[in-house]
Image (spheres, coloured by chain):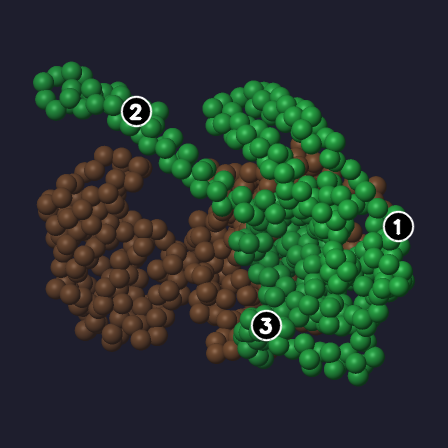
Chain colours: A brown, B green
Amino acid sequence: MARVELRNLRKEWPGAAAVAGVDLTIEDGAFVAVLGPSGCGKSTTLLMLAGIYSPTSGDILFDDTRVNDVEARDRNIGIVFQSYALYPAMTVLENVMFPLRFKRIERAEAERQAREIAALVRIEALLERRPSQLSGGQQQRVALARALVKRPHLLLLDEPLSNLDASLRLTMRTEIRRIARELRVTTILVTHDQIEATTMADRIVVMNGGRIEQEGSAKDLYERPATLFVATFVGSPPINLFDATRAGDVLRSGAATLACTGAAAGALTLGIRPECLRTGGAGMPATVVAVEPMGREVLYTAEGALGTIRFMEAGAEAAHRAGDEVALAFAGPDALLFDRASGQRVDGRVTS
Amino acid sequence: MPPAFDAPAPTPGPGSKIASMWPVLARRARVRRAASQSALLAFLLLVTVPILLPYFWMVVISFTARSGGVASNVLWTACAVLGPALLGYIGVHMATSSRRLRVIAGVALAATAGALLAALIGDDLHLANYRFLWRSDIMEELRSKATSGSQFPSVWTAFFNSLALALSETAIILVVASLAGYYISRFAFRGREAFLQGLLVLHAFPAMTLIIPIFLILHWTHLLDTIVGVMLVLATIELPFYVFVLKGFFDAVPWDIEMSAMTDGATRRQAFRMVVLPQVRVGLIAVGVFAFIRAWEEYIFVRTLLIENKNWVMSLYLFWVSDDIMGVDYGIVAAVAVFYVMPSLLLYVFCQKYLTQMTIGGIRG
């Protein structure tokens, strides 16, 4: 159980910086998700934490002690890879006991500890099998048991769920949460899947281009994204974006003119989430061009004064058909405004 | 098998016509498949004969030749018995897929062939040609003491020299090639690409062109006419290729399991030994077998670099046995050849399932 701190951490490969200055503090026992697209530096950060890569510059601190030069094997970290990285030549029990081979523990005691952790992740029945005889979900549990058997200070999860099918993913999400909470181990989850991040973690760190874009709760990221990148990366279906210009009290975008107050000025990007648009009142006129039922809600694509815009309405039945005229109005959280040059969110209130 | 869907109902139209065609089409497909399979089998049998026949002949000679002469009638008699037996078994194999029937037919045919062979050529079989195994003075007996007195070592001297040469070369190649292959696979270093290309270029060179410089180098280093010298030369010449092969096997081992082992508490060396090496086991076995057989069958370099008869290896022994200044005894030559072939044949039989995996470039099944 450890408090983890990164100070201006950088990792440069020849010709490119994978991690370009990351500052981050993770409190003891927290469950943090690092969310970002592939190539954003999140896995590199994880491997630097694990001690596999050494940072080009910056510091890694565990409980306020600099561990940059401590070898991976001495950091007392458990790690679960996307591929699970089980040792194919060993049985499940041998896999789980592997980390204990490097500690001065008697075999009987090691086996007792391995069986204890196996019970925690519910793989007692599989101990004699080989990894090749396990399903994806079972392999995942074995990898988790192996990572936890030495009671690590820090548990690192690198895209742990992306090789599982949808229903197993749901189960394992809950399982990993439960196990992390039971052991009160500081956990860092690296993922590109926003649902994984928002459902499992207490706090989410969004990374892009080797830097942290924003950190906060799922609600923060969704309602008050700091940058255009966060706004597009968090939220599904993706946010509608339009180029817009502020002129006095109005915001012009395409053929539309919207009322606008606040500090926003100059060249802007207007972001409207599909689920924040409502029909059935006064609003911007638009013509429905496509209808996509998604189960509990229906996603529509419409052409209006702003251009092509998506909106979503609850209900299994489609209320509009292609060709229908609708009036779109903002509901729920406001539309978002971003500075077009910097991508930073700027204050401003837009009404339809 | 006809396609597994129902023919359309016999309503007027093209459907009913097609439905009546199915059995015809199915029969035609069956005939065509049987014909092409038979043709393939016949072709394979045909190209196998010139490869297998010399080996078979060698074995037959070693058990039948008397006082140096070779009687080919025994060979043809044996072929006349074994050929039909083999063809008969192939026919049974094709006709039935029942495992029991195949085994019964195989045993019956083998028994018949054995009985026929015993009746027809049983009197000609004897083990006298193998007396070189326990009599080291066989050459004195064959020629005369004056020409070959104490020139010939015991075959076991040559056998153990060959074994020492092959085993030590295998050991050197396994150790060096696995470490080098791992390093090239995992580490970036200046000149890595050039090094890799160099490995292949080195392998493309005919090593024979180096034979004079190698002779001189061994002479200067006082390794001429020693097993150690030949061992070093062979290992050096063979290494580039095996480094390249094992690099391919290491490339196929995911980085994840190594990283995982290192966070689990292993040093890099421990991770290599405990986690990575077991993953390339198949490659190590294949490389080991090939290295062994390569050294076991080596002729040119041992002929050039080994001189004294206490340093002879099996290939030199065979060469000198067949040296025909005084007339050659083909029975003994064949028996020595059979004895010489046995170890590599056994190795091949036991390891062939690993060897076939090497040919597909390190991709393991």
Q: In what element is the residue under mark 2? A: helix
Q: Which three-letter amino acid code belongs to the residue tagged 3?
A: Pro
Q: Residue at label 2?
A: B27
Q: Which three-letter amino acid code belongs to the residue tagged 2?
A: Arg
Q: Which three-letter amino acid code belongs to the residue tagged 1?
A: Arg
State the residue at coordinates (59%, 44%).
Answer: B53
Q: Residue at label 1?
A: B135
Q: Same chain, marks 2 and 1?
A: yes
Image marks 2 and 1: residues in contact by CB distance under 8 Å:
no
Q: In what element is the residue under mark 1? A: loop
Front residue of A119/B361: it is: B361
Q: Chain of mark 2?
A: B
Determine crowd level at label 2: few under 14, some 14-19, many 20+ residues with C-alpha closer than 10 A. Answer: few
Alpha carbon distance from label 2 to label 1: 65 Å
**B271 left or right of A6 in image:** right
Q: How many marks?
A: 3
